[in-house]
Amino acid sequence: MGLTGVVVNLVVFAGVLDLVAPAPGGSLTANLFHTVSLTSVRSREDLLASAIAFVVATFWNFEWNNAWTFRSRVGHLHSVNLRLGLYYGVSLGSLAVNELVLFGTLSFLFPLYGQGLGIVLGSVVGFLGNQRFTFAERQIGIEDRDARR
């Protein structure tokens, strides 16, 4: 879930970056491992690639978290469609952290490293928010307990 989401994010990030800002020689490796100043035009492409990677990886993570990590024994408080919406909402907080870290590190880290660091820090925000809000479970009330007897 988390680790596979990181892999999906980084693969999509690298692929989009190669499409929108190809290296002169067309080398994906050369494209990813370059240094950029804060005034570089390239930083916009890095942020765009990060946002697209976020959308794809978030859907991937939701599917796995819904099916595995936060599966419920008593049932979720919200429908699957509402959970997906809440998941994206909470994940926007993760994206904000990710983008700030990426932008803040572009002048001294390779973009892929800044993206990885942003994913780690954003994941903490996302996990806590989704655990509390998105995948909240129904509370078993008196009616539910009486119905079980």
Image (cartoon, grey):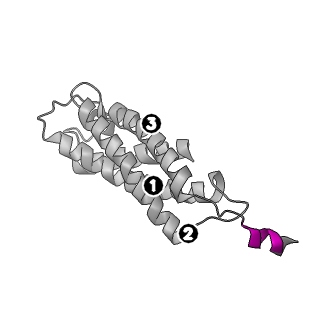
Callouts 3 and 2 close, C-beta under 8 Å:
no
Instruction: Identify the residue under disc 3.
Output: 120
**137 vs 114: above or below:** below
Looking at the rendered structure, the number of numbered marks drawn on it comes to: 3
Rendered residue at 46%/61% (across/down)? 86
Residue 100 point in image, percent of width and height: 28, 39
Q: Quadrant of residue 107?
A: top left
Rendered residue at 52%/58% (across/down)? 134
Residue 91 point in image, percent of width and height: 42, 52
Instruction: Identify the residue under disc 1.
Output: 58
**103 vs 129: above or below:** above
Q: Could you tell whether 65 is left or right of 75 in the image?
A: left
Instruction: Identify the residue under disc 2.
Output: 80
Pointer 2 or 1: first along the chain: 1
Magenta residues?
141-146
**Observer-nearest residue: 44 or 83?**
83
Name, please, the residue furthest toward the front: 142
